Amino acid sequence: MDIQKQRFLTELFEGAVLAADPLEAMRSYLPAPPKGRTVVIGAGKGAAQMGQAFETLWQHSLEGVIVTRYGYSADCARLRVLEAAHPVPDAAGLAATQQIAAALKGLTSDDLVVALICGGGSSLLAAPPERFTLEDEQELNHILLASGAPIGAMNAVRKHFSTVKGGRLAAMAHPARVVSLIVSDVPGDDPAQVASGPTVPDGITLKDARRLITNYGIDLPERILNGLVDAPDRNAPEFEGNEVHVIASAALSLEAAAQTARVRGVPAVILSDAIEGEARDIGLMHAAIAREVATKGRPVEAPVVLLSGGETTVTLRNMGGRGGRNSAFLLSFAAAIDGQNGITALAADTDGVDGSEDNAGAFADGQTASDMRAAGIDPLNALARDDAWGAFDAAKSLFVTGPTGTNVNDFRAILIGDVPEH
């Protein structure tokens, strides 16, 4: 693979991640200090870095608890940072959620709660309804993750099988004022969808959740289906006076990546920041557009970089597969541009980990599928086996960054043509 093109695409990814850096993103949204206590709670794969940023910016007393994914911690001087499992909850997540709930007890109207919420919080905040166990919530998450349903549908179900999601944490904090600072990883940037909205209620009813389960063919056990509970009413008095701010999102990050490309002399086109659908199908769609540009110069001419974000899904057919939705997208893409010159792509998760392994994503060009076959792996067979990681590992084209400290979801950059020298 052309190293110069690979470096260019990496620069775009880095620009997108930098635009979602919590320290800079948070500055404009700091609330006024309260008369009483400031309690900080947080959940998500970038929540520890958000806590670290808030500590840097907040020149007043504070206390609180944050939960993040194993290996994603950051040093905080005044906040307790706990770690738990993602994408399926574990006992550590259950204990961490109980500590967060305990931190919200006994607050008054003079107190302030700052909620630092980002992607990944749905599994990290483990709290099944009464009479249900952690094992029940784990089973629910396994089924949802394998279902291929969009994130909005999955989160709608999660909110109705929880004692903390769907605004319930904010309700616990009442009568304290709650200010939610949110890094969005969901298509459309609806704050109530991020981490299943622990401090932001929405209008999705139990009836709506059941309809989504039916529409997407989510095969839940009868006991879990019967255990779904109503979510709080978003117009309830407990939520009056609260503030919600989306401080970083895929839209802002894609704009930053586009500007990075233009500075390098490559025109950029943002296809969408809210693409959803089956990863392999979205890969075919992107490949068709890239080939159209490369061979016919429409709808734009090369050189150009096509950018997109959102959150695709993978309907698992083989539970033993390795990888994530970005790798699955790119494997489908690589197979579809097999032998095509002048197309180079990067697909990665902005939090630094794509699915089950330690890579953020992968690179691909018109030679990648051939490299996989030379290593003894058929790309389409690997896609059918849900082993995108194994295919890209064999082709030596994995993209590894480590945890980035933020999460604005999928990042896709497709370069058509060459990069000017600089």
Image: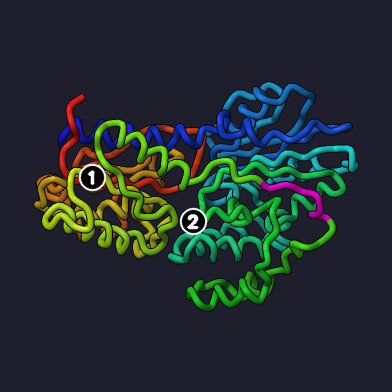
The residue lying at 41 percent from left, 42 percent from top is: 255
Instruction: Indicate whether 66 appears above or below 184.
Output: above
- Residue 294, position as x, y percentages in the image: 14, 52
Within the image, what quadrant is residue 59 found in? top right
Q: For residue 350, what is the image quadrant?
A: top left
Look at the picture and state if 162 lies above or below 4. Answer: below
Name the residue rendered at 50%, 64% in the picture. Answer: 143
The residue that appears at 68% across and 71% down in the rendered structure is 205
Residue depicted at x 55% and y 73%: 212
Is residue 356 located in the magenta-colored stretch of the structure?
Answer: no
User: Dot 2, crowdedness within 10 Å: few (<14), some or many (≥20)?
Assistant: many
> In the image, which residues are magenta?
238-244
Using residue 411 as the reference point, say whether residue 45 is left or right of it. right
Residue 78 horizontal/vertical position (percent): 72, 24
Query: Counting other residues with Cα less than 10 Å from the Cα at mark 1, is it few (<14), some (14-19), or many (20 or more)?
Result: many
Residue 304 located left or right of residue 339: right
* Nearer the observer, 4 or 154: 4
According to the image, label 2 marks what residue? Answer: 187
Q: Evaluate whether residue 71 shows in this view.
A: no
The reply to whether residue 301 is visible in this rendering is yes
Residue kind at label 1, given as amino acid type: Val
Can you tell which mark lies on residue 325?
A: none
Q: Quadrant of the N terminus?
A: top left
Name which of mark 2 and mark 1 comes first in the sequence. 2
**Element under disc 2:** loop
Q: Nearer the viewer, residue 144 or 417?
A: 417
The residue labelled by disc 1 is: 304
